[in-house]
């Protein structure tokens, strides 16, 4: 809201961005650090096998694990 592109009465959809980078849980911290030099945050994803409802088909699904910022790396 500090850039005057949105205000407090606007819907959340006006502030949402689709410009973000993702990393996998097994990516290196060096890769994450390079991403965070250019971006404010990164989405952390992980993949795992998932059985469908009838337990007959196994699919690899990707899920969001969390969001990380450069401040998180300071600890």
Image (cartoon, rainbow, N blue to C red):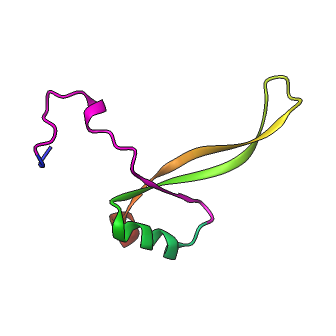
Q: Is there any visible trace of residue 75 in the rendered image?
A: no
Magenta region, residue range:
4-26
Residue closer to the observer: 37 or 26: 37
Residue found 86% across the figure and 28% down from its top: 55
* Apparent side of residue 73 relative to residue 58 in the rendered image (left or right): left
Task: Look at the image and say whether residue 12 sits in the magenta stretch.
Answer: yes
Position in image of residue 28 (x %, y %): 56, 72
Residue pushed farthest bottom?
Answer: 30
| Image position of 30 with respect to 45: above or below | below
Residue found 38% across the figure and 67% down from its top: 36
| Image position of 42 with respect to 53: above or below | below
Position in image of residue 1 (x %, y %): 15, 43
* Apparent side of residue 41 relative to residue 46 in the rendered image (left or right): left
- The C terminus sits in image quarter: bottom left
Position in image of residue 60 (x %, y %): 75, 44
Residue found 14% across the figure and 32% down from its top: 8
Q: Is there any visible trace of residue 5 in the rendered image?
A: yes
Position in image of residue 58 (x %, y %): 83, 38
| Magenta: main secondary structure | loop
């Amino acid at each position: 809201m500090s850039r005057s592109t949105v205000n407090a009465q606007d819907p959340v959809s006006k502030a949402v961005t689709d410009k973000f980078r993702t990393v996998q849980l097994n990516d290196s911290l060096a890769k994450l650090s390079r991403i965070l030099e250019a971006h404010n945050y990164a989405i952390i994803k992980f993949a795992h096998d998932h059985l469908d409802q009838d337990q007959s088909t196994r699919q690899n699904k990707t899920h969001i694990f969390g969001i990380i910022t450069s401040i998180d790396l300071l600890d």
